[in-house]
Image (cartoon, rainbow, N blue to C red):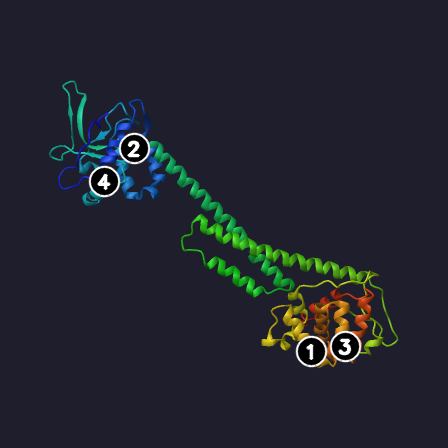
Amino acid sequence: MDTGFVTTPFGRRPMSLALMKGQLQVESVKPDQSVDKWKVFRNVCEARPLLDISDRTLAVLNALLSFYPESHLSGEASMVVFPSNRQLMVRAHGIAVTTLRRHLAALVEAGLIIRKDSANGKRFARRKSSGELEDAYGFSLAPLLARSDELAAMAQKIEADRLALRRSRELLTICRRDIRKLIDVAIDEGVPGNWDDIEAAYIHHLACLPRNPEASDLNGARLKLEDLRADIVNLLTSFDNFKKMSASVVQNEPHIQNSDTDSLELESYPTEQAETLPMIAEPAQTAGPQKIFPLALILQACPQISDYAQGGSIRGWRDLVTAAVTVRSMLGITPETYQAACESLGRENAAVVIACMLERATHINSPGGYLRDLTRKGARGEFSLGPMLMALVRQNSPVARRA
C-alpha cells in the first residue's frame, strides 16, 4: 500500500487530528482486501444524508473514481489518482474550478479521500525504468476501501429508515381515510355524538405534525388517531346495537288499542289522562334497574333539557339530573311522585323520562299521572326507555325536521 506514513497538506491548508485519524485508518486495510469501486460509490450515494455531502460532491467523487483504472479498489495496488483540475472539471460535468476545489475539500473532510501532496503541490506519478508506478501524488481512494463495511452499513440504515418512513406514511394515510369516512357516515346516518369536537381533534392531531415529519412523528400522530378511530367505531357500534335492540322491542310488543285512540305510535305520546294511557311494553321480564343509555344519545333525543341546565349546556349526568329537577317543578310533578320514579327506574333514568316528557309536554295533560303510570310499569318490568328515546331521535333528526 501507499500509506506508509502520515502526510500533511500542501500550502496554507491546515493539518487536523481528523485528517491524521483518516490516514491512520487506512493502515488497517489488508493487502488481500478489495471491493468494487462502483458498489462503494453507490453506498456513498445512499449514505449521503449521514455523510453530509451534496450531490455535486458525489459528482466529483465519481470523476475521481473514473480515473482509477481498475474496477476494484485493492490493498495490493496504489489507490492514488492524479488528474489535473482541468481533467476533473470535464469529467465532473464542467463545474467551475472554485466549485471543484470546494467539493474536493468536502470529500476530504468527510473522510472519503486523502490528499497526498507532493513537495510543490503538483499532482503527478513517478515511474520506474520498467514503466511500473513507483510513487504518485494526488488523491488517495484508500479510505473508500478502509470504510467499505461502514459505508455499506450506513447505506442499509438509510434504506431501512426510508422504508420505515414510507410504511408510517401508508399507515397514517389509511387511518386518516378511515376517520374521515367514519365521521361522514356517522353524520349522514344521524348517529348521536359530538362530531364537531371529534373532527376538531382529528384536525388538531394532523396539524401538530412538522413540515417534514420523520417516522417517529408520523407514528406518534397515528397512535393518537387510532385511539380516536376506536372511539368512533365504539360509538357507531353502540348505536347499531341500540337500533337492533329497539327494532326487536317494536317487533315483539303487543298491538294495544283503547276506545279513545285507534293505535299508539312510538313517534307520539297520547293526549288522554296519564292514568289511562297504555305504555310501550317489552316482553315480560323481571323487574330491575333500567339500562343507562349514552348521554349523547339522550341529548340528541331531548335537546330542550339543555335550556334548563346551569350555563345552558349539559356536560354530564349531574347536570342532567339537576336540570330534570327544575323541569319536574315546572311540569307540576310533586317531589313524592318524582322520588318514587327515581326509586323504581333509577335516578338517571327518571331524569331521562322527565327530559322526554319535556319534549312532548304539549301532548300530556297530566304529567304527574303520566309519570306515576310509568313508575308502576317500570316496577313490573313492563317499561323500557329504548323505544321512547328512538322515537324522539327520529323526530329530532335533520331529515324529520326538514319534512
Kindly check if marks 4 and 1 are in contact, taking CB atoms under 8 A apart as contact. no
Give the distance between the C-alpha atoms of the residues marked 3 and 1, in whole angstroms: 15 Å
Camera-side residue of 202 and 16:
16
User: Is residue 187 found left or right of 169 in the rendered image?
Assistant: right
Secondary structure state at the residue bearing disc 1: helix
Secondary structure state at the residue bearing disc 4: helix
- Which of labels 4 and 1 is toward the front? 1
Give the numbered dot on residue 251: none
Q: Position of residue 343 (x, y in %)?
A: 76, 69
- Which of labels 2 and 4 is toward the front? 2
User: Is residue 78 found left or right of 219 in the rendered image?
Assistant: left
Q: Is residue 68 above or below residue 190?
A: above
Residue hosting label 4? 104
Q: Residues within 10 Å of mark 3 (few under 14, many from 20)?
A: few
Quadrant of the rendered structure where residue 95 is?
top left
Q: Position of residue 76 (x, y in %)?
A: 26, 23
- Residue drawn 58% across and 64% down? 195
Check disc 1 and give the amino acid type: Val
Q: Position of residue 200 (x, y in %)?
A: 52, 63
Residue hosting label 1? 327
Residue hosting label 2? 144
Kindly check if marks 1 and 2 are in contact, taking CB atoms under 8 A apart as contact. no
Q: Earlier in the sequence, mark 2 or mark 4?
A: 4
Residue hosting label 3? 336
Q: Earlier in the sequence, mark 4 or mark 1?
A: 4
Quadrant of the rendered structure where residue 186 is?
bottom right
Check disc 3 and give the amino acid type: Glu
Check disc 2 and give the amino acid type: Leu
Q: Is residue 189 above or below residue 36?
A: below
Give the distance between the C-alpha atoms of the residues marked 4 and 1, in whole angstroms: 85 Å
Check disc 4 and give the amino acid type: Leu
